[in-house]
Image (spheres, rainbow, N blue to C red):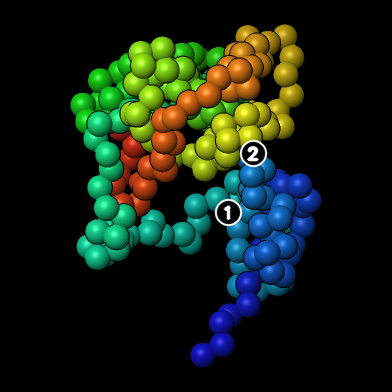
Amino acid sequence: MAKQKKYYVVWNGRKKGVFSSWNDCKKQIDGFEGAQYKAFADKTEAQLAYNKNYASYKGKNTKKATLTATEKASYGSPILESISVDAACSGNPGKMEYRGVLTHSKKQLFIQGPYQKGTNNIGEFLALVHGLAFLKARNKEDIPIYSDSKIAMSWVKKKACRTNIVFDQSNQDLLILIKRAEKWLKENSYKNPILKWETKAWGEIPADFGRK
């Protein structure tokens, strides 16, 4: 059976519009903070959706992926002798905070915020850098750090917080913190593995704020 063609609406991305292939859509949203997009089976429906707003379609006709026991087993188990980090943000941008915990016990190791006009990705990035500095200061560079944010992990690898939000007087303290984190990454080396927390297989990351 031929695969059904889909059309992709991008409300917020590098370019906005209706795209006829996933590759074209992905170029607009991959690594773009706050990207808003959705797939449609019909071109007319996609064009109508584009003329509305993302909030009208967010979460509609989507099912949470459930893995089979075999699929879950393929992910293995998380390393419990590790720390986990996560962020919470009400709005985009909005009030943001982040924290780090021991993976095995959920004991909180650090927490920062709330900061005004932040984003979840910024919080995830800062949490990772904070975690790296926390472990380095304690000579525990063999301890892994888990994050459920691919974007934040890529930012740490690039040693730059590639947010596109606008900073003003209300969130200058957050900008200062970001610059400090970037400086730390450029001036320090680390050996801690940064690992992806597989939410589908393991549930919410232990550092989750539980506000979903």
Q: Secondary structure at mark 2?
A: loop
- List the residue tagged with mark 2: 33
Residue 197 lies, with reference to residue 165, above or below; the image says below
Q: Is 69 situated above or below 172?
A: below
Horizontally, residue 67 falls left or right of residue 151, namely: left
Crowding at label 1, few (<14), some or many (≥20) Cα neighbours within 10 Å?
few
Residue drawn at x 72%, y 47% is 13
Relative horizontal placement of residue 16, taking residue 75 as reference (left or right) = right
Residue positioned 69% across, 59% down in the render: 25
Q: Position of residue 113 (x, y in %)?
A: 49, 13
Reply above or below: 134 against 33: above
Q: Which residue is mark 1?
A: 57
Q: Position of residue 159 (x, y in %)?
A: 62, 29
Q: Quadrant of residue 184?
A: top right
Kindly state the secondary structure of the residue where label 1 is placed. loop
- Estimate the x, y position of residue 144 in percent, counting from the top left: 36, 33
Amino acid tagged 1: Tyr
Marking on residue 90: none
x, y percent for residue 165: 70, 28
Look at the image and tell me whether residue 110 can be seen.
no
Tag 2: residue type? Glu
Quadrant of the image occupied by residue 35: top right
Going from N to C along the chain, the mark reached first, 2 or 1, is 2
| Residue at 52%, 43% in the rendered image | 150
The C terminus: image quadrant: top left
